Image (spheres, rainbow, N blue to C red):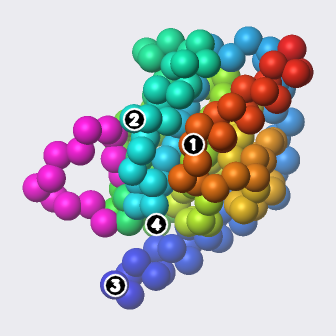
Amino acid sequence: MFLNYIKEFFVKKSLKNNLRIVKNEVFTSNIQTIGLLIDESEFRHSKELANELVLQGIAPENIKIVAYRDKIEKKKEYSRLTFGKKHINWRAEPTEEFLTEFIETEFDLLISYYEIEKPILMMTTSKSKAKFKVGFSSVDKRLNRWMIDTEMGNYKLFVSELFKYLKSIK
């Protein structure tokens, strides 16, 4: 348990250094690929959220979902790619291949679907190579280009507000 606190300290330190680097992401008016980073410790409706994105015209195969959980049960099989604290090393780098691939993928849009600041989630968002990042207004403003002020449980409103703003930019 003490080692987790030390690991979290190093992740926070690395995150702080990452947030100093301002990235000028460019919005592309044609969103085709979406990365969805979800905190499933707090939100269990990731399938419904993905369905809302599909209803907005995004192809299901162009939505890649990665879920974070505070506690991962060893014998339980998850329906999505799921990671936790043990999948990040002391240098704040992912140890799982799927997480590295998610971070390195240049999505047109990354949706950081978490409203509680957890260093591992924030680090994943910060390191992501996505062209444009969207998240909740309750999370550090330096992580995302757009912040939507809704509740995490109201995913329909979040998606409708997101696409309302995206269409107004086109």
Report the residue marked by disc 3.
1
Q: Separation of disc 3 and disc 4 at Cα? A: 14 Å
Sequence order check, earlier mark of 1 and 2: 2
Q: Are marks 4 and 2 in contact (CB under 8 Å)?
A: no
Q: Are marks 1 and 2 in contact (CB under 8 Å)?
A: no
Sequence order check, earlier mark of 3 and 1: 3
What amino acid is labelled 2 in the image? Lys
Q: Residue at x 45, y 54 (%)?
A: 43
Pointer 4 local density, CA inside 10 Å: few below 14, some 14–19, many at least 20: some
Give the image location of residue 21, x and y in percent.
Answer: 81, 51
- Identify which residue, 105 or 132, lies in the foreground: 132
Q: Helix, strand, or loop for circle 2?
A: helix
Q: Which disc, if any, is residue 155?
A: 1
Q: Helix, strand, or loop for circle 1?
A: helix
Q: Helix, strand, or loop for circle 4?
A: loop
What stretch of residues is rendered in magenta? 71-83
What amino acid is labelled 4 in the image? Trp
Q: Residue at x 38, y 81 (%)?
A: 3
Report the residue marked by disc 4.
90
Pointer 3 local density, CA inside 10 Å: few below 14, some 14–19, many at least 20: few
Assign the N terminus to one quadrant of the image: bottom left
Pointer 2 local density, CA inside 10 Å: few below 14, some 14–19, many at least 20: few
On the question of residue 100 being in view, the answer is yes
Q: Which disc, if any, is residue 47?
A: 2
On the question of residue 123 being in view, the answer is no
Sequence order check, earlier mark of 2 and 3: 3
Q: Separation of disc 4 and disc 1 at Cα? A: 33 Å
Q: Separation of disc 1 and disc 2 at Cα? A: 11 Å
Q: Quadrant of residue 116?
A: bottom right
